[in-house]
Amino acid sequence: MYYGGRGIGFGWFDPTYLLLIAGALISLAASASLKSTFARYSKIPCASRITGRDTALRILQAAGIRDVQVTAVQGSLTDHYDPRNKTVSLSEPIFGHYSLAAVGVAAHECGHAMQHAENYAPLAIRSAIVPAANIGSTLSWPIFVAGLIFSLRPLVMAGIVLFSLAVLFQLVTLPVEFNASRRALAMLVQTGILGEEENKGARKVLTAAALTYVASLAASVLQLLRLIALANGGSRRDR
């Protein structure tokens, strides 16, 4: 966006696009790493020959959790735990397979169920801010752009605040995901599903998955910085 040399633009080039590009590259790199790591360890069977479904059931039982269901869901890497109906949903490559990747991902989702069962604070905080984060991610850009177009500073600031809510959600997500992985890896050894050496493979899968959340947060922070830069450039232009 060009502001006649008095803002943040230089001729036809808007340097804030560099923040956007950097965020995209970080996200793409993390996604590629996850897919590569997942593909590698999906081909390595665990010695116990236990599937993702049975892994989840055994871990839940060992943790004393008896009110959580384990179901199959379509897609790949669509695995998740839903605290609303207490369901661990495992994707097709996880549910019925006994690879190191399958048992690692299944155990991770059970880690979230364990968090929920003991009212793990970061998980409760994340669940509480979901509505605000959804509103922020949906309305932030339309409000921000409208504020720039009509030179309404309050709208510009409102857009930034709303986007910040989505960034906050991603920030709170990090301890939730890392903690779930730690619980998962401990339970895999404790229940005898994986040996110590096999657990290293599962750890690599879960680490690659966790890094996608770190990359997503980094990309969002860069996007937030871009919004702030654009807002400041627009403010200087209007003086």
Image (cartoon, grey):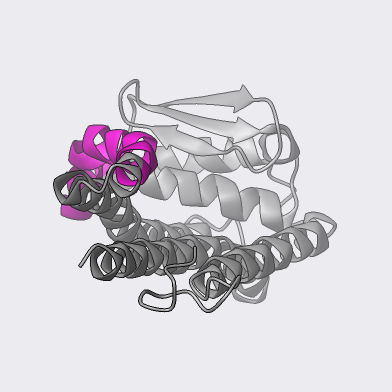
Residue 55 position, x and y percent, is 57, 43
Let me know if residue 67 appears in the view. Answer: yes
Given residues 114 and 144, the one toward you in this image is 144
Q: What residue is shown at x 85% (from left), y 57% (from top)? A: 43
Q: Nearer the viewer, residue 124 or 159?
A: 159
Determine which quarter of the picture holds residue 7: bottom left
Q: Residue 62 colored magenta? A: no
Image coords of residue 117 (percent x, y): 24, 39
**Looking at the image, is 125 positioned above or below residue 68?**
below
Residue sticking out furthest to the top:
85
Q: What residue lies at 51% left-to-right and 67% top-to-bottom?
A: 215
Q: Is residue 120 visible?
A: no
Q: Quadrant of the C terminus?
A: bottom left
Residue located farthest toward the right when viewing the structure as drawn: 43
Give the x, y percent position of residue 173: 34, 55
Residue 177 percent location from the top left of the image: 40, 57
> Which quadrant would residue 42 be assigned to in this image?
bottom right
* Magenta stretch: includes residue 127: yes
Of residues 145 and 62, which is closer to you in this image? 145
Q: Which residues are magenta?
A: 116-145
Residue at 31%, 62% in the rendered image: 234
